[in-house]
Image (cartoon, rainbow, N blue to C red):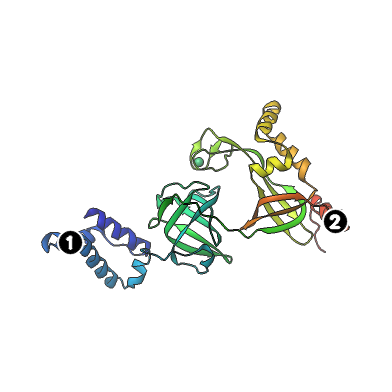
Amino acid sequence: MKEIAKQIEARFLELGVKVQTSEIETQLDQLINKFKVPPEEARRNVVNLLLVKHNIPKANYFAAHDTMQVKTSDIKEDGNWVTVRGKIVQLWEANQESIAQVGLFGDESGTIKFTKWAKAGLPSVEEGKCYIFKNVVTSEWQGKFSVMLNKTSEIIPITEDIAVSSTPTEFIGAIVDIQGGSGLIKRCPECNRALVKGACGEHGKVEGLYDLRVKAVMDDGEKVQDILLNREITEALTGITLEKAKEMATEALDQVVVLDMIKSKLVGRYYVVSGAKLDRFLLVESIKPDVKPMDEDMKKILAASAAPIAQEA
Ligand SMILES: [Zn+2]
């Protein structure tokens, strides 16, 4: 009975209404113990009474249960409760304490960002594994949709392998900058966040795992594009393997040597990249040198990005 009362209280809290647990328990107690009503029926009764009392439409309360399964490409509205079935394409670093996991979730129709709140208390998901995300809320920000996993959501692992469709974006331009946090980095073994001075934002001092990545900025003369290269792509492109990077850092007693080497190999060169676009990043799946000769426009871009930005008179 306490459990039912807690669940009811939690659900109303999500709808913005604080109901006293004692009030719920008293009503449940009456129905179950005095009138011998089965617990599930008692639950329904109490919920209905509270909905009327607080003037909440029934649909709002039950919205989180038995939500419709949709394809990620069908998510085009903010604030809907849905169920999706797909694969964890990528896990990113969660940069806020309120977020337990964040990444890219994909199915046969496309990909969508997902955010699992720390408060949800849900199990961890793994990259490359498939799941049903039950009762998740859709969200929109700047025209892009995502799904949020909260306390009422459920994560159900499935063994079936789901083929993820991606519509790759191509970008052609020069790499004009390599950003901080590139090169040889260490990640938290628990949450995959990049460590800052050997510490994870959530788990504190941990024995980090080495990784190699590049966050870069490309410019095509009209617009800039942030790109993200994972370890495999970084190794193939720079010829610096993770092992080599570790050796370089050990010899120099500083992992900045790896970043410097990457900069010298990539900055100022032209590439054709393609991959899935997410927020401001293009997650690179393929990168090839652009064979076009350097034209005057590109020389100007490079000169401009190397010099401080001139103020217009
Ligand atoms: Zn961590």
Res 166 quadrant in image: bottom right
- Total labels drawn: 2
Amino acid tagged 1: Pro
Q: Answer above or below: position of 233 versus 293.
A: above
Q: In the current view of this chain or complex, which residue is farthest to the right?
A: 296
Viewer-nearest residue: 190 or 85: 85
Residue 16: horizontal and vertical position, in percent?
37, 64
> How far from the left and from the top, in percent, is residue 120?
41, 52
Mark in the foreground, 1 or 2: 1
User: In whole angstroms, how far apart are the C-alphas of marks 1 and 2?
Assistant: 77 Å
The N terminus - image quarter: bottom left
Q: Residue at x 36, y 69 (%)?
A: 60
- Does residue 276 appear to the left or right of 75 in the view shown? right
Q: Which mark is residue 300?
A: 2
* Residue that appears at 32% across and 71% down: 58
Q: Nearer the viewer, residue 196 or 285?
A: 285
The residue at which mark 1 appears reads as: 38
Mark 1 touching mark 2, by CB under 8 A?
Answer: no
Residue farthest left in this picture: 34
Report whether residue 249 is seen. yes
